[in-house]
Structures are given as C-alpha cells and as structure tokens.
Amino acid sequence: MTDTSQYLIQQEPFYQATGREVELYQAAYRSRLPVMVKGPTGCGKSRFIEHMAWKLGKPLITVACNEDMTASDLVGRYLLEANGTRWLDGPLTTAARIGAICYLDEIVEARQDTTVVIHPLTDHRRTLPLDKKGELVSAHPDFQLVISYNPGYQSLMKDLKQSTKQRFVAFDFDYPTADAEASILQAETGITADVAGKLVKIAHTARNLKGHGLDEGISTRLLVYAANLIKDGIAAGDACRMALVSPITDDSDIRSTLNHSIDAIFG
C-alpha cells in the first residue's frame, strides 16, 4: 500500500474566501464531482485547492501540465531494471488508488490526446484503464479529479474540448476586491495596511491595461513577491519594478506608465 501521509498537507495553507466557494467545493467533494477551476494566472486557484485538500484532510497530488507530457506520464509506465521490468504508477493512477485529490494544473498545456485518459475517471465509471498493463483501476471512493486553466490564454490550438469540459463542475476565479487583496497581502507577508493598499492600487493600474498592451495584469502572486521584498527592506519603488513591472512586459510605453504609477503612489 502507498503511504498517503507523504501527500497530506500538514499546515493550513492561507486562503481568504471571496464568496461561497469553500461551501460549494465541499458539496462537490461530497458528491465526488470532478471540479474545474478557471481564472487568470496568480489569482489563487492552486492555493484554493491546497486549502480545500487540507480542510477535507485528503491527500493532494499535483501535476504541472506541459506540452511534452504524455499519457504515460499521468498513468504510469514499465521501467527496465537489471532483473527485468517493473511497473511504476503515474500520479493520476496513484491518486485513484489511494483516494487522493489529483490536481492537474493548467490542463490546456497538455496535449489533447493526453487529456482524454481522464475521461473514464470523470463519469459514472470512475475507472482508469492501464492498457499497457492490462489492468482496469477502479477509483478509491475518496478520489476526486480537479483541473485548472487560464481562459485568457485560450486559442483554437489550446483549449479544452467540450467533451472534456462537460465532465466537470466549474468555479470561476478572478482577482479579489481591493480590500480583500490588501488583507491577503497583510496576512501573507506582514506588511502594513498602507503599503498593501498602495500595492493593490498599482495592480489595478496594470489590470486596466489588459488588452491595451498587456496580455495579463499583475497577479496577486506578484504582489506578494513585491510585499516580501519591501518587508525585507528593499525600497518600495525598486521592489515594485523588480516584481511588478519587469516580469510582465518589455514594452517601453507600458513600463513607463507603470513606473509613473509607482512613483505617484509611493511618492
């Protein structure tokens, strides 16, 4: 038997609810419904899933999806050893066997021929065929599948098929309100309410530029980075330019606009 303790989250991950998402997720888990979380990068999707796994006391196995990921990376493969071959379960198979929450982060980054392997786990069958091994894994009663993606990066080449989407219940995430986001920064980093509020104002300036030169606004994650730098003694202007401006754009006009906002807000 696999030791599930290695997949348990020991300390409560901080998460500030912005609505009824905690209650609704618990209802989805009670019915073992597959869950899809959608929202912009760095808005708290992964933290929410970590928090819910901790709250439910269930193991969490996270997979960062990428375009090179194969079905074997998810379900498992035979390994060649000195004495022959040995089967090694992939993260999806492990989660199905032990009753973990399996979180496939940024699912659209994976190839569509890879993601179809999740289909039998997301309907009444709750099974996972291991074709190479000739085994049909019946999911543990506690198993749940969760996927996430950023709708802002959808394209004809990178989107989920309807046949996949319609197997999930969905949560729409967005950046928190200004007050909530400032509270998150204070709780995560210990900075003052004044500094937190100023960082959030800069973020809103950048988010208003989305679609007008920026593909994506400043995420809550980046605000936490900037706050940590400021807490460590870095000047606010330098921290903001390093954490909030340079990572998101190389456009000189956009940088100038954001730098002006930083100077105006922090003086």
Image: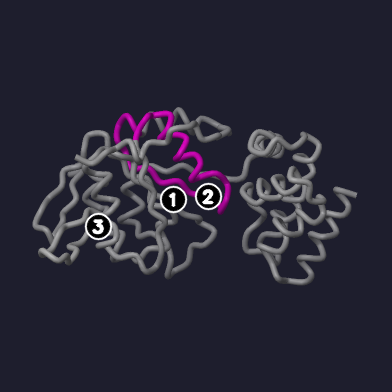
Residue 39 magenta-drawn? yes
**Residue 148's mark?**
1
* Amino acid beneath label 2: Gly
Measure the alpha-carbon separation of dots 1 and 2: 8 Å
Q: What residue appears at the point 87 percent right and 54 percent down from the top-left corner?
A: 263
Badge 2 or badge 3: first in the primary sequence: 2
Circles 3 and 1 in contact, beta carbons < 8 Å: no
Reply above or below: 153 against 181. below
Element type at marker 2? loop
Q: Dot 3 lies on which element?
A: helix
Mark 3: give few (<14), some (14-19) or many (20+) Cα within 10 Å.
some
Which element type, helix, strand or loop, lies under badge 1?
A: strand
Which of pointers 1 and 2 lies earlier in the amino acid sequence? 2
Specify the amino acid type for callout 3. Val
Separation of marks 2 and 3 at Cα, in angstroms: 24 Å
Q: Which residue is rendered at x = 20% and y = 42% of the image?
A: 139
Determine crowd level at label 2: few under 14, some 14-19, many 20+ residues with C-alpha closer than 10 A: some
The answer to whether residue 108 is left or right of residue 173 is: left
Image x and y of residue 203, in percent:
72, 50
Frontmost residue, 34 versus 225: 225
Image quarter of the N terminus: top left
Which label number is shown at residue 117? 3
Query: Where does the magenta region start and end?
Result: 29-58
In the image, 126 versus 62, the foreground residue is 62
Q: Three-letter amino acid code at disc 1?
A: Ser
Residue tagged 2: 39
Which residue of the protein is positioned furthest toward the right in this rendering? 267
Q: Is residue 27 left or right of residue 99?
A: right
Residue positioned 56% across, 32% down in the render: 17
